[in-house]
Amino acid sequence: MSSFRAGIPSLVLGVVVSLAGCAAAESQSARSPGPTCFENPECKRVCELARTEPLYQAECELRMDEADRSRIRTTRIVPQNDGGNIFLSPSAQAARKRLQEEKAKARAEAEAQKAEQGKKKAANGAPAKLSNYAWDTPRGVPDVAKVVIRSVVSIETPSGFGTGFSIDSSGWIATNLHVIGGESKIKMTDANGSVLKVLYVGGFNRKRDIAILRVKGPSVPELPIAAYKYTPDVGTSVVAVGHPMGLEATVSTGIVSQVRRLTKKTNVIQISAPISPGSSGGPIVSHYGQVVGISTFLVKGGNSLGFGIPAGYLWSLARSPKAISLKKFARYTRDLKPAKKKKRVLPKVSHGSDVLQGCSGAEREVAKTMLTAALGSAQKQVDAEEHGAAYHGLIGASSDLGAKLGESCALRGVLETGRQQAGKQSTPAKRAAYAEAVFRSLAALLSKK
């Protein structure tokens, strides 16, 4: 009995030593990446006993953090290469497996979605493949025009007409930004009359007045583009192709008059080839078949004074296009949309059939023809806000017509009265408007007879 009692302190001391050793091992594990409690045979034994003997649970729980105790009491002491499943109950292991599978599935779905978005972005924003080849020898205007015309497209918007040309036969068209600025409805037609569907705007540059568009439809042969920093020499012969006033495939020739600095980073090419409204956005091509410029604008009042933007500026847009929907593009560039012209109000002028008394059938026919032709010329000048020129043109036509009419024709006196009344108006615009009103009234009367 005495020997049994003597052994109790030794047993208690052993347990205390074991607990201290296990705690020290855990403390060492927490402090540094040294041996863990699991690798300590005594510590492992205590925690394994805790699974069946409640007496050891307190000692083992000292080695677990708060998060592990909230789930499973014996999950803290695990080897790092075992996936965390040792000492877990079967239900806990199944729960962990389901969680891992759900996370793996979510990652796979996210990666698939990202890949799909990348494919769409690559398809929409695929860079245009520009080329800069040139013919070995220069060719004549007919040969150049024949090649260029098939690559030129007409552009129509609610605000007017313009021109574009193919830079990649896979479906990329270049033009001036001001041709399509502020527009969400853009109609494009190739040289064969086929309609090209505009998918989106691939990019634009306000300072250089250029834009590229992605289209779908029949393949349009591309034109080679001059290098990025290339500008033609003064005196270089060029061919310009466009659709002035909606007249398709109009070819004009000239030379490079000068290369001028527009801004610090932008040049303009001055050319002698005529550029009319509707030709903007068309190609300016050298006799070696390269597009060296893009027709941009014409100086009013200048005799064959046109300008173009170097075509090499297109390279920067083509390399990294950004798909912009037509609605967004129209919103971004609404400040470029031409303001709607106010409807012109003409003075009220009317004539009765008595103004034709004494006029022969031949005189009436001559009057009808001359009045109609004069009105057509005046309308173009008024649209260009050249009211003075429109007035003088109408007055001149009135005098010429009066000289062709006999003295017995009452229309001769009506024309003279109209000239006098028009000359009394206060401004060129009002004088042109009054003369136009007289002409329209007489033309309408003659059309009824």
Image (spheres, grey):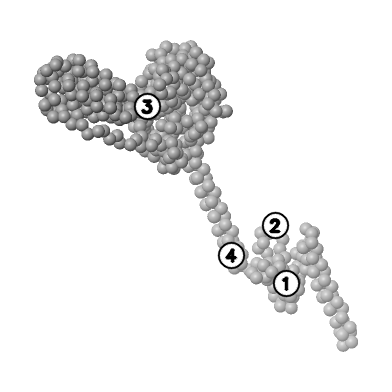
Q: Nearer the viewer, residue 65 or 295?
A: 295
What amino acid is found at the position of numbered circle 3 in the picture?
A: Gly
Mark 1 or mark 3: whose residue is earlier in sequence: 1
Q: Which residue is label 2 attached to?
A: 81
Determine the CA span between mark 2 and mark 1: 22 Å
Mark 1 or mark 4: whose residue is earlier in sequence: 1
Which element is circle 3 on? loop
Residue 213 vertical placement versus 86 (above, below): above
Using a 10 Å C-alpha cutoff, classify the residue at mark 3 as few (fewer than 14 neighbours), some (14 to 19) or many (20 or more): many
Determine the CA span between mark 4 and mark 2: 19 Å
At 18% from the left and 15% from the top, the residue drawn is 404
Q: Nearer the viewer, mark 4 or mark 3?
A: 3
Q: Nearer the viewer, residue 312 or 382?
A: 382
Q: Which residue is label 4 attached to?
A: 95
Q: Position of residue 401 (x, y in %)?
A: 21, 18
Determine the CA span between mark 1 and mark 4: 22 Å
Which element is circle 1 on? helix
Mark 4 or mark 3: whose residue is earlier in sequence: 4
What amino acid is found at the position of numbered circle 2 in the picture?
A: Asn
Give the image quarter of residue 252.
Answer: top left
Which element is circle 4 on? helix
At 24% from the left and 23% from the top, the residue drawn is 419
Q: Position of residue 376 (x, y in %)?
A: 27, 24
Q: Nearer the viewer, residue 227 or 449?
A: 449
Determine the CA span between mark 2 and mark 3: 75 Å
Q: Which residue is label 1 attached to?
A: 61
What amino acid is found at the position of numbered circle 4 in the picture?
A: Ala
